[in-house]
Amino acid sequence: MTTLLQSCTSFNAAPVGNASFDVTTVTELSKDGGVTEKTFPGQFDSVPLIIIRESETKYLAFCTVCTHYGKKVSAPANSTSDIICNAHNGHFSPKDGHVISGPPKSGLTRYNCSFNTETNILTITG
C-alpha cells in the first residue's frame, strides 16, 4: 500500500516497467472480454495494472492510479464496463482509458502490449 501511495505523489507520472507473463495462467483472460488486475513485483512500482483481453491476440493494460487525486481505480466487471474511481466517481473508458465523466482531467495511462501467439506470452511495457 505504501508503494501505491508513493507512486501517487505525481498523478500524471505513471509508474514505468516491463513485464511478461503467460496469459493461459490467468483464468479471467481465457476468453475475449476478460479482465484481470495483476501486480508485477519490482515493475511499475508494484502498482497493479488492469489487463483486458479484447480479442484472441489483442490486450490492453492500464495503470490503476486515478489521474484526478491518485486513488486506486477498480477493474471493470468486463471489457465493456467503465473503469471507475470510487473516490470521486471518475469514469474511464476500458477501450483507451479516456475520461468519460467525473473530475479527472486526463485519462489513465495505457501501456504497450505485445502478444506472442506461439508462446501465449503477453509483454507489457511503458
Image (cartoon, rainbow, N blue to C red):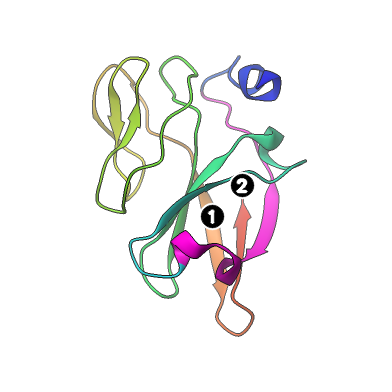
Residue 43 placement (x, y as % from top left): 72, 42
Number of on-image labels: 2
Q: Residue at x 55, y 62 (%)?
A: 26
How far, Cα to Cα, is label 2 from label 1? 6 Å
Give left or right: position of 52 versus 47.
Answer: left
Q: Residue furthest right?
A: 42
Where 22 falls versus 43 (above or below)?
below
Q: Amino acid at mark 1?
A: Asn
Q: Describe the element under mark 2 as helix, strand or loop.
A: loop
Local crowd size for mark 1, using a 10 Å CA cut-off: few (<14), some (14–19), many (≥20): some
Task: Report which residue position mark 1 lands on.
Answer: 112
Q: Residue 20: within the magenta? A: yes
Q: Describe the element under mark 1 as helix, strand or loop.
A: strand
Residue 75 placement (x, y as % from top left): 41, 40
Q: Residue furthest front?
A: 27
Residue 51 disc label: none
Q: Residue at x 38, y 60 (%)?
A: 34
Residue 73 placement (x, y as % from top left): 43, 30
Q: Residue at x 49, y 34 (%)?
A: 64
Q: Residue 18: within the magenta? A: yes
Mark toward the start of the polypeptide (2 vs 1): 1
Q: Amino acid at mark 2?
A: Gly
Give left or right: position of 59 versus 90.
Answer: right
Of residues 1 and 99, which is closer to you in this image? 1
Of residues 26 and 40, which is closer to you in this image? 26
Residue 69 placement (x, y as % from top left): 45, 14
Task: Report which residue position mark 2 lands on.
Answer: 126
The stretch of residues the image draws in magenta is 12-29
**Do callouts 2 and 1 mark residues in contact (Cβ within 8 Å)?**
yes
Q: Quadrant of residue 1?
A: top right
Q: Quadrant of residue 118?
A: bottom right
